[in-house]
Image (cartoon, coloured by chain):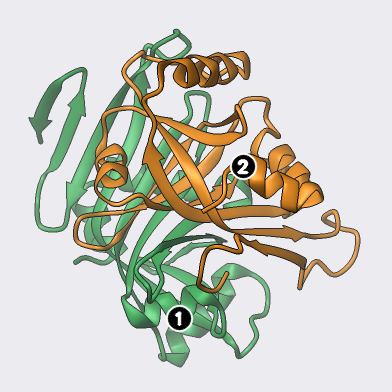
Chain colours: A orange, B green
Amino acid sequence: MATWAQFEAAAPEMAAAGRALLYQFGTGLAYLATLRKDGAPRIHPICPAIAEGGLFGLIIPSPKQHDLLRDGRYAVHSFPMPDRDDEFYLAGTAHRVDDPDLLAAVLAAYLASGATSSGHETFFEFGIERALLATYPKRGDGPGWPPTYTKWRDPGSRGRI
Amino acid sequence: MATWAQFAAAAPEMAARGAWLLGQNGGVAFLATVRKDGTPQLHPVMPQLVDGGLYVFIVEFSSKARDLANRGSYALHGIPAGPENEEFLVRGRARPIDDAGVRARAIEVCGYPKMDWETLYHFEVEHALTTTWADWGTAHPEPVFRRWRAGGPVETVGGGEATSG
């Protein structure tokens, strides 16, 4: 499982495009899918933060927090862009982080992006197993499908993208 | 498990907000499914409401079609919209529809042609959730949740209070 920094070192252009999509509205914004106890999917929007070489989610006490504490497997997807259909997708396993210095640095980056904190969040780092970037022409600039796909998989992980 | 029409009959205000939210952002919503290996997956889709049912056209050779064939369970989220960032979530089970008449109606409502390899799925509703916000615009807005489960009442949860009605 790779950190964001490891993913970025291995696939810098893809990571740059992914970062731009996650932060396209200023504050980080993405969809998070987790697994319910019964194995069914759960989905919610979150404000991810890239900081200290990691991708983090600050998750309030909630069903998705329970999901991640029980089974860290996740998927993250960028929000759609206003003028094109580019997509950035990550999957892997999230784990709770508790190091106070790390939490302080991540929180600072999170707040600096415009996100707000209740002070009651649990911090999770999203380990990256698979990444997918789909790029499309600007809407109205010709056929939009299929997109150009760029895939990356952590060499230490197994499974299809 | 209910149809959208049954959901709308039992929880009309929630269904109205849900229908509105699913129509925002160009009609794009996000679909979560579960892969064969048990991991979650996310996809943008364009759901549509047709004659009291919630439907999505899905490319038959896509990973989400594989997921739905394997498990059928889904969660669908309308992209937050409106001046106070309302949210709408629905989950349940999805199954492919072979009925040519239903497919024709869905294509008619959709407004543009569909290829043979775009399979129509009916999304049955087990649970729905709307989220609005108290004190929106403040540093710490409080979410107000309205929940509905097939066969049950609407439940409102917000500010530590829970009510049914």
Q: In the picture provided, is B83 more to the left or to the right than A33?
A: right
Quarter that holds the C terminus of chain B: top left
Q: Nearer the viewer, residue B127 or B51?
A: B127
Q: Is residue B22 above or below residue A52?
A: below
Instruction: Name which residue lies at 45% across and 46% down.
Output: A32
The residue positioned 56% from the left and 53% from the top of the image is: A90
Kind of element beneath mark 1:
helix
**Tag 1 and tag 2, C-beta contact below 8 Å:** no
- Few, some or many C-alpha atoms within 10 Å of disc 1 (few <14, some 14-19, many ≥20)? some
Q: Nearer the viewer, mark 1 or mark 2?
A: 2
Q: Position of residue B109 (x, y in %)?
A: 55, 69
Q: Residue A85 or B37: which is nearer the viewer? A: B37
- Position above or below: B65 against B87: below
The residue sitting at 64% across, 81% down in the picture is B114
Residue at the spot of label 2: A4
- Quarter of the image with the N terminus of chain B is bottom left
